[in-house]
Amino acid sequence: MLKKYVVFIALPTMAISAALTPLAHATVAPHKIISLSPSATEDLFAIGAGTQVIAVDQLSNFPSSAPASKLDAFSPNVEAIAAYKPDLVILNSGATKAESVRSALKKLRIKVYFETAPLDMTGAYKEITELGSLTGKGPQAQTLIRSMKSAVKKAIETGRKKSPISIYHELDDTLYSVTSETFIGRVYRDFNLVNVADAAAKADSYGYPQLTPEYVVQSNPSIIYLSDAQYGTNLASVTARPGWSSLKAVTSNHVVALPEDIPSRWGPRLVDFYQFVSKSIAGIN
Amino acid sequence: MKKTSAGIGQIWNWKITASCALILLAIGTLAISLGPIHLGFFDILKTLIGAHGLEGQDRTVLLDLRLPRALLAALVGAALATSGAVYQTVFRNPLADPYLLGAASGAGLGATIAITNSGGNIYGWLPIFSFVGATLAVMTSFFISGRFFAEPNTLLLSGIAVGSFATAVQTYLQQRHSNALRPVYNWILGELTVANWSIVSWSSIYILSSILVLVTVSKKLDGLLLSDEESFSLGIDPNRLRMIAVAAATLATATAVSASGLIGFVGIVVPHLVRGVTHRVTNRSLATIALVGASFLVLADLGARTILSPAELPIGVITAFVGAPFFLFVLRTRRVSHQ
Amino acid sequence: MIKVADLTVKMGGRSILNDINLEIPHGHWTCLVGPNGAGKTTFLKVLLGVREYSGSLQDNGVEVYRNHKRNVAFVPQSPEIPTGMTVAEYVALGRSKVDGWGNETAKSRQFIEEVLIQTQLYGMHQRHVAQLSGGEMQRALIARALAQEPQLILLDEPTSALDLHHQISVLNNIEDLKSRGVTVISTMHDITLAAMYAERIVVMHEGKTLLDGIASDVIHSAELRTAFDNRINVYTLDSGRPVIVASKDESKN
């Protein structure tokens, strides 16, 4: 008798849930995604949407399992993108003629996620959330964000100094630097590191002023971060610059070579960057 | 010139112009048939004549991507080639190009101002700014040539001064706004990448009317190859003609530059190509030069998007590749003919 | 008749031509002589109609400035030589005054051929103008002027670049033109040649005309010698032809 009731309840329940299931997945998550942004690529794979990606641009080198293609992030070729018949294209707003590319893709009825470079961690998390909901990996995205937040918090807690330390972040050997208003600048600021470039902020309204050698020598930073290490700049070449051998950073051996890519992406490896900075200032009082 | 037994042969032949038009048509058809997405040739033809051909995405690719791009390449190529020919006549210098009077630097400055001052949609304003920049630069060159208004050598010097000034201001702005560096650089290299029908429609109005004006006065342009007194004696008002010619040529150049950035060498190479093949220095070949310029750039653009597919070569690289050796060739033959 | 009244041409505050009063008859050959800087070339340009002036210069009663109704050929001393143009095309430019720019008729082509033969350029008419020697270029200029069928021809030093043989042949061509009713006004450094061909001579000095009149009168005048600071000698050959040569010291002749 009980069996009959179970059947009478179970069957309709199963039927209803079967009927409802297609509704829950009525908008099928895109499974032919093209990512033209290295940071977005890292995000996608970190939230488990990697299997939904069919092609990434030439600069998306992490993770190495990402399906590399000859597509170019900076000069997207609309027809070449369309040839893949994607159902979602992640396009960075810094690409050449990004607006035109976006409208052309729209005409071809291809969905576009228009990514703008975030200005801080909140923006980076927002992108992860958005990519999560677009790919049907909402919960996974939230999990990633939570773990990133706690790792970053831990890195700051262990690493942050009580009193501010002056630093100089070098973009290239013509002394372009970053102010604390940039993404990278904020990371440094979280550790109470003060950019010597801040005082020169007026020289470039976007936070990337070019400094003069005298200015750097005068500011006497305690740490020098070399973003141009990948181009060959190192402790030796920096010491060789006239007047620089007397800098605190040089004499106390705090000239730090930054790894490639990690400081210029706003994906999950930002955590690695926070931990890197934390370690680099560990020995300073 | 064909020397008939009766004496001096005819100087110009409309058949050459007609065949160049046919060649342009053929090259254009080739250009819209090739690309990363394969489209059937006959389907393309059927779609173009309005019959039932391609559908859906393929149709959009043909009509909204390839066709406007090919048309824009043709327009820009025609504009630059014609302006180059006219400038070469006006300045009596076979190495003159359409960017001589500061048009390039002015356009670059306009583009930089647009890029550094806009929040979001740069590309909406960019064409207007670069157009205004190019035109203002040329007008300034005329203005500061002062008393020797429209005299070729003075104009040339004014143009150099104006161009240098514009470039200096542009460099300053770029130093102050580093985020503008990449977009400006890309624009300078010259791109036809995402042409659309709106760009094609406004640029065709300006470019076609300029070319029309120039072809209309082209017969008299030969007179500008002589000194002002000589051309006056032959019924020309040299200053007025120079102004009209330079104004129309600048309009065409400014439009081309604002639509597609700075594409070099077309303005120098194509006039010489046509003159070399037809053995005519006369400007009556202006219509032919326009057509050949159009074909040249459509071909170059085809190369730009197919050679390294799916990446795009900047079209300025291709025109320089063809143009630079050609340039040297022109210099060499010039020296030979002067011996 | 060309009537010049109170003609003054200034440039940068300086007077190049100063209060010139003159009458030049049509159908004759008038030659302007005088030292460098006398204003001869400027006067030619004013006669052409390209230079602004104050005063009056009328050709058949109409001011000449920017007057395109006249058919005036201008043969400059140093022309702009276009690159890439053949001699035939260059000479054909002259026909544009007659046919209009860009029109060619079979008649015109015939005319051009005759002109090329006349100036002994026929064999080289396919050559580029830029490749011509100085003398050949001068003949090409004359040919272009002839092709124009002008009413008035202005020549600035038409013989300076020519060898003796061609000097004579070019001047003969011009004389031929004159005999067909064309008015000739030329400037010449070689006064002996001027005396051979010109019917009237105008002596110019520092922007003014010192004397104008029949060639034979002017040649033997004191004004001619004054214009050249008395550093010329005028001899007369047995045939009656005058020969004018420069002298080392002030002449007493």
Image (spheres, grey):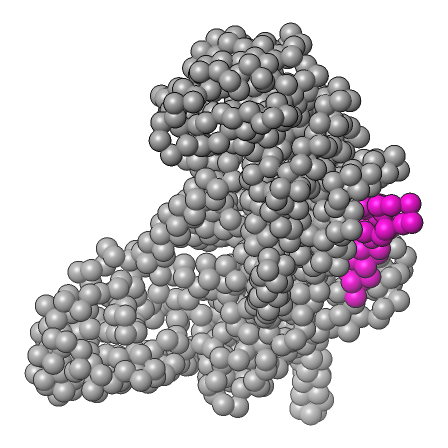
Q: Where in the figure is residue C128, as x and y percent of width and height?
A: 69, 52
Camera-side residue of A225 and C29: C29
Q: Identify the residue at horizontal 55%, vertical 14% (top origin).
A: C217
Q: Is residue B242 left or right of residue C124?
A: left
The verdict on residue B2 being magenta is yes
x%, y% of residue C43? 52, 22
Residue C219 place in picture, x, y as percent: 53, 20
Farthest front residue in view: C238
Tell me if residue B230 can be seen. Answer: no
Q: Viewed as shown, does residue C25 lie left or right of A242?
A: right
Nearest the eye: A8 or C151: C151
The C terminus of chain B, quarter of image: bottom right
Q: Quadrant of residue C200?
A: top right
Residue A72 picture quarter: bottom right
Please report the residue visible at 40 percent of the width from the left and 19 percent of the height from the top. Answer: C226
Q: Does B72 lie within the magenta span?
A: no
* Image location (x, y in percent) of residue C81: 61, 45
